[in-house]
Amino acid sequence: MPTTPETSDLLALAERVARDAGAMLLAGAHDLRLDVSTKSSGTDMVSEMDRAAEALIVKGILAARPDDAILGEETGAREGTSGVRWVIDPLDGTTNYLYRQPAWAVSVAAEVDGQVVAGAVCSPALGDTFTAAIGAGAWCNGQPIAASGATDLASALVGTGFGYAASRRALQAAVLPHLLPLVRDIRRYGVASLDLCWVACGRLDGYFEAGGQPWDVAAGLLIAAEAGAVASGLDGGPVAPESVMVAAPGVATALFDLLVRAGAAEPLQHRV
């Protein structure tokens, strides 16, 4: 699907609202008086800043495109009539943010008739904004990016993530002993959108996770794909929010085979 003027407009809007929310979050990053609660479990935190960032993004989108649909992590779904839907994670890495760690991001993606065509992931504390438009490549801070040229799994740096439920985390942790002896190392940053962007620019050679949500990966998967990374589901099916493996082309097959042997899809089968 080539980039159209509308796709370019969607990308510009995604980047603008992601940057605006990122700037607001960065300005409030040292306020310890935040109202913090939990969602799916005691480790799944949400703050007033998550909600404020989403409100700012939604306001910006609807001011420009009032007929679009929206799926936001904090506010849920809003119906639209235009065929365009925005998928928003206003603060990916809330725990990092609340602990004053710099790895957190704002992720905004635009879908047309169910296909993501534009996305932006803004990481203001690290000074990076990743963007992509379908068929037009991926960028970091306006410069083209590409997945790494890694060809040897033994020297590949691989990222992963864990769910919030204790039962899912136990299954995910059981995979790691099978991987650690066979790769360079494992990284766990807690920010799926950034993990995908770091595969896109070669800061990671691969990434996998079971149990994500659409807003976690919508923009990042497009950015990784446009940067030349290979994506699939952990069970061999198509990549999906709940089943993600993304890797540099030279190690993708070997990493997938290793993840199959390690049982990385097990949390999906148990649906915990």
Image (tube, rainbow, N blue to C red):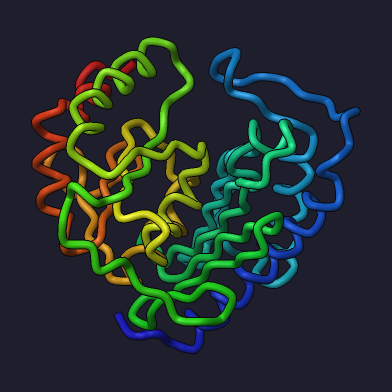
Q: In the picture provided, is 189 more to the left or to the right than 235? A: right
Residue 236 sits above or below residue 150 on the image: above
x, y (%) of residue 250?
16, 63
Residue at position x 53%, y 72% in the image: 140
Would you say residue 155 is visible in this rendering?
yes
Q: Quadrant of residue 171?
A: top left
Residue farthest bottom in this picture: 5
Residue 38 sits above or below residue 196 on the image: above
Quarter of the image where the C terminus is located: top left
In this orientation, which residue lies closer to the viewer: 96 or 231?
96
Residue at position x 14%, y 44% in the image: 256
Count the marks: how many? 0
In this orientation, which residue lies closer to the viewer: 4 or 224?
224
Residue 3 sits above or below residue 171 on the image: below
Residue 178 sits above or below residue 89 on the image: above
Q: Quadrant of residue 94?
A: top right
x, y (%) of residue 97?
70, 38
x, y (%) of residue 214?
43, 44
Quarter of the image where the N terminus is located: bottom left
Residue at position x 65%, y 44% in the image: 91
Would you say residue 222 is visible in this rendering?
no
x, y (%) of residue 47?
75, 31
In this orientation, which residue lies closer to the viewer: 90 or 191?
191
Residue at position x 56%, y 81% in the image: 142
